[in-house]
Amino acid sequence: MEARIDKWLWAVRLYKTRSMATDACKKGQVTMNGTTMKPSKTIKEGDVVSVRKPPITYTFRVLKAIENRVGAKLVPEMLENITPKEQYDLLEMSKISGFANRMRGTGRPTKKERRDLDEFLSDDFGTGFLFFDDEEEEME
């Protein structure tokens, strides 16, 4: 039995929608034996498909070529995950380093930065802004 690669990716729940699976194929994120796959290419049982979802590349062996979406409990009967352990280690490293790569002062403040900012702007230290009342008195 054969199936279109975009339909199979959607049917085994690797992508949420079929159009997302089609777009991934068009962008070159889906390969088989090192060759990028067009959405209409057919796959058969025993093929090894690689799907690049940054930062890692997942590798799957096709056990059944289907085109109709199946329940999540039936997915292990349709594919075998043969992704190397190094790829999952890479995923863990990117999760850990995701917080360390933020440049100071960019994006949303951390909890500590927010507390420091609140403390600076609180009445304990004044308003944090300098107001000169003397200039107003001289103008009058």
Image (cartoon, rainbow, N blue to C red):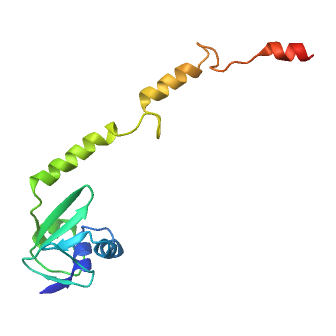
Q: Which residue does the image show at 12% across and 51% down from the upper left?
A: 86
Q: Which residue does the image show at 19% across and 49% down from the upper left?
A: 90
Horizontally, residue 121 falls left or right of residue 22, namely: right
In the image, residue 7 above or below residue 90: below
Return the residue nearer the eye: 18 or 34.
34
Return the residue nearer the eye: 129 or 112.
129
Q: How many marks?
A: 0
Residue positioned most to the left: 46
Q: Quadrant of the N terminus?
A: bottom left
Which quadrant would residue 68 be assigned to in this image? bottom left
Q: Which residue does the image show at 27% across and 80% down from the upper left?
A: 39
Residue 88 drawn at (x, y percent)? 16, 51
Which quadrant would residue 98 be assigned to in this image? top left
Horizontally, residue 92 falls left or right of residue 121, namely: left
Q: Quadrant of the C terminus?
A: top right
Residue positioned most to the right: 140
Horizontally, residue 75 falls left or right of residue 132, namely: left
Residue 48 drawn at (x, y percent)? 11, 72
Horizontally, residue 37 falls left or right of residue 106, namely: left
In the image, residue 113 above or below residue 27: above
Residue 109 drawn at (x, y percent)? 46, 34
Q: Which residue does the image show at 25% across and 55% down from the upper left?
A: 55
Residue 92 drawn at (x, y percent)? 20, 45
